[in-house]
Image (cartoon, grey):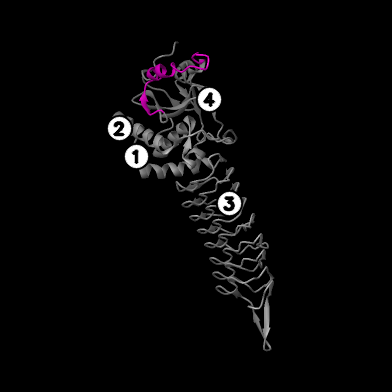
Amino acid sequence: MTKVKDNLKLYGTISAENTTYNVTGITNNAFKGTAVKTVDLSAAYNLTQIYNGAFWGCKSLTSVKLSSSIKGVSNDSFRECTALKTFNFNGNSNITTIGDRMFMGDTALTSISIPYSVTHIWSESFKGSGLTEIKISNNVKNISYDAFRNCNKLKKITFEAGGSKQLYLGQHVFAGTTALQYVYLNREDIDAETNVFEGTNDNVSMQGYGSTSYTQSICKRLLKTWNLTYKTSYTNSQKKQFFTDLAKKVGSYVKAADIKEEGCAATVISVKKGTCGGYARVFYNCCIAAGVPNTDVLVGGDSHCHAWNYVKYGGYWYQVDCGWSRYCENAQQYYNLLKTWKDKNGNVPTAHRPENWIVCVDNMTGAEDENHYNNPYCKNFDQVLREGKANGISITGKRAGYPISNY
């Protein structure tokens, strides 16, 4: 084996001294650092395992084709193969894991088709590789920390729809993906750590019906970190304190910045940047994650350029604005604030009049494609009050929290 300089091709058996041996494995570090250029294992029908570091640091290696009989490819097996452009799993349906650091540092590897049989992608497996796009099958249950970290050419991530198991995304899985443009969260149940996309491109677009579970899972972790809890049995004073404390936390967690999807909770909570729409939807999702009934928290706005939240306790509606650091104010106070806004001609925009304020209904994340799965719509808040309900939202008590409309 050590005499191989260019092309390595293995078969099911080898013969030596009139004895035939089955080729069942490639041992630890067997070809580490050698000048091999291609590896063809497609005819090695007895091969079941490639062990740790087998081809680590083969700087001239450009292509690999596996055998369909292989059941395991261990840690570091193709690590730092910087010329590797093509990796063919050859229809393998036995491999269930992508090992630790398996393709780490493979900067020439721009694409790969991960077998559907894979259920776990372990830590740093593709860290620093040249991938430009990746598709995660609905059979994958776990992606461990740093798996795709610093893949700075990665532009598109697709989580395939379907699957009956929850997908867990560990610490910094896609951190440092500075070229990332699109994330399609089509997996229904996603459980993510708070820093999965830390340091990614601020203008990434996050879509898909899995964005709701993704966002909710992060909110639950943030609430635990912030030591914030909510109970429906709380007194009005305790509820007000919860909403105030939460708004302060969201306001400090999200940095004010104009980004492409400033109003999408999944994006804003990932990159920790956004504007009023993002603050409002992150606050809303945190409330839902804490157990606040969806009858007691709303996303609203002035139908023009500003967004905030409505919260209810003691039968009254109040407004919360995380970005402006204003908490549990009634609408009269808010109107007095907003009516001072003027356009470039010195006029108060009609949208700032409270009779034009809106409520977003069934709008969990504000993702670009949310109308495909949540049927969100906007409703005039005055109309909500007059009807006394909106999609199950019950308005009780006096209108003291919102006293300014003319009827």
Q: Residue at x 58, y 35 (%)?
A: 368
Instruction: Look at the image and give the residue range highlighted in magenta.
Output: 324-349
Residue 372: x, y in percent? 60, 35
- Specify which label sits upstream in the sequence, 3 or 4: 3
Q: Are marks 2 and 4 in contact (CB under 8 Å)?
A: no
Image quadrant occupied by the C terminus: top left
The residue indicated by pointer 4 is 378
Amino acid residing under circle 3 = Asn
Observer-nearest of 205 and 23: 205
Q: Is residue 49 left or right of residue 297?
A: right
Q: CA distance from mark 2 to mark 4?
A: 30 Å
Observer-nearest of 6 and 51: 6
Residue 198: x, y in percent? 48, 46
The numbered dot on residue 400 is none
Residue 143 lies within the magenta run: no
The numbered dot on residue 238 is 2
Give the answer, above or below, for where 138 lies relative to 393.
below
| Name of the residue lying farthest toward the bottom | 17
Amino acid residing under circle 1 = Thr
SS state under label 4: strand
SS state under label 2: helix
Residue 128: x, y in percent? 55, 56
Q: CA distance from mark 3 to mark 2?
A: 42 Å
Q: Residue at x 39, y 36 (%)?
A: 252
Q: Residue at x 53, y 62 (%)?
A: 101
Amino acid residing under circle 4 = Cys
- Specify which label sits upstream in the sequence, 2 or 1: 1
- Specify which label sits upstream in the sequence, 2 or 4: 2
